């Protein structure tokens, strides 16, 4: 039954995120907001909605390790699983903005999170405010100076949805996200209790992979269609948003107390490590390009992370 709850919860989260994305993009186009603004704000928020809703609900329900573990695990999965599979199937040419903006900001965000929680095992409300403020500064910087370097992640067609359809997608998407988060958290907690493992283990494996499924699906579709629909910059942007927005907003609503010490003595170091190792992989052996060998390295790191977590 717990597994059924998890599967149904993930399905609702994915569907809800897609419906919310359609409504958000449709509203933005109807209001004539530039695509670059849609891609960097509305689309980012909509595609990170599953992580955001799950983390907020987990923190409010008294399961902070699910909230923190979900984000840490998702960030590891985005690079070690999603990016790895993508570049194994299809090489990626990396934009110069990777080492000028994207990677440094991801590392700064990761180190900020590490610094905030490593001493007292709590992400305080004021620390959440700092994270969200950093996100706002980052977005403003991108909008003003790096607009051409940002890969748009919006539909290619400019069809404006009727107002009633936008409203329907928004309402149904919101309900699906909320219901999916309830089912996923119930299933995850139940599974942890049934197998006698910590909620953190379920969070950094099952839940994190589940909330990364949309990115993985987009990567596979991109490969099948031979389109550059996903890039290293997009995945790094997702990691930045997970830390600054998801954990930032969650901490503002409810400070996150980390109960399982393994999150701070093990998991967060894996997140920092795999985030760092992407930089040399981009330049070795071929500059500004990621190929199948790099994908194998990242995938081995991820498999090792999961194996040691479940051990």
Image (tube, rainbow, N blue to C red):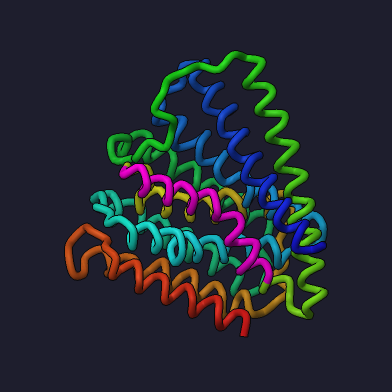
Q: Quadrant of the N terminus?
A: bottom right
Q: Is residue 203 magenta?
A: yes
Q: Quadrant of residue 175?
A: top right
- Residue appearing at x 68%, y 60% in the figure: 67
Q: Is residue 83 magenta?
A: no
- Residue appearing at x 56%, y 21% in the figure: 27
Residue range corresponding to the magenta coloring: 202-226
In the current view of this chain or complex, which residue is farthest to the front?
224
Q: Quadrant of residue 80?
A: bottom left
What secondary structure is the stretch in magenta mostly built from?
Answer: helix
- Residue appearing at x 46%, y 46% in the figure: 218
- Residue appearing at x 54%, y 46% in the figure: 133
Query: What is the x, y in percent for residue 20?
Result: 62, 33
Q: Nearer the viewer, residue 230 or 241?
A: 230
Query: What is the x, y in percent for residue 169?
Result: 65, 27
* Depicted 293 relative to depicted 242: above or below: below
Query: What is the x, y in percent for residue 18?
Result: 58, 37
Query: What is the x, y in percent for residue 270?
Result: 49, 74
The number of numbered badges drawn on the structure is: 0
Q: Nearer the viewer, residue 197 or 240?
A: 197
In the current view of this chain or complex, which residue is farthest to the left?
286
Q: Quadrant of the C terminus?
A: bottom right
In the current view of this chain or complex, which residue is farthest to the bottom?
311
């Amino acid at each position: 039954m717990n597994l059924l709850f998890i599967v149904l919860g993930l399905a609702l989260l994915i569907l809800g995120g897609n419906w919310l994305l359609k409504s958000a993009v449709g509203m933005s186009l109807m209001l004539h907001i530039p695509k670059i603004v849609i891609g960097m704000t509305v689309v980012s928020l909509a595609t990170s909605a599953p992580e955001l809703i799950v983390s907020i609900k987990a923190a409010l329900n008294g399961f902070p390790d699910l909230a923190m573990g979900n984000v840490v695990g998702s960030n590891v999965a985005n690079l070690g699983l999603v990016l790895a599979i993508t570049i194994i199937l299809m090489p990626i040419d990396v934009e110069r903005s990777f080492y000028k903006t994207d990677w440094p900001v991801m590392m700064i965000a990761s180190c900020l999170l590490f610094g905030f929680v490593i001493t007292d095992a709590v992400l305080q409300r004021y620390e959440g405010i700092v994270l969200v403020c950093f996100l706002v500064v980052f977005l403003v910087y991108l909008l003003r100076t790096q607009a051409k370097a940002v890969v748009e992640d919006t539909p290619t067609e400019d069809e404006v949805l009727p107002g009633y359809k936008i409203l329907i997608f928004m309402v149904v998407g919101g309900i699906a996200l909320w219901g999916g988060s309830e089912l996923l958290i119930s299933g995850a907690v139940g599974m942890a209790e049934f197998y006698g493992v910590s909620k953190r283990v379920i969070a950094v494996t099952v839940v994190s992979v589940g909330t990364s499924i949309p990115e993985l699906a987009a990567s596979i579709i991109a490969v099948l269609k031979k389109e550059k629909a996903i890039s290293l910059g997009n995945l790094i942007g997702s990691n930045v948003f997970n830390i600054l927005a998801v954990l930032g907003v969650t901490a503002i609503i409810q400070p996150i107390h980390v109960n399982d010490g393994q999150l701070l003595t093990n998991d967060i170091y894996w997140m920092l490590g795999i985030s760092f190792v992407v930089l040399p992989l981009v330049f070795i052996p071929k500059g500004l390009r990621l190929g199948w060998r790099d994908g194998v390295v990242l995938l081995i790191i991820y498999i090792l992370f999961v194996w040691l977590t479940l051990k």
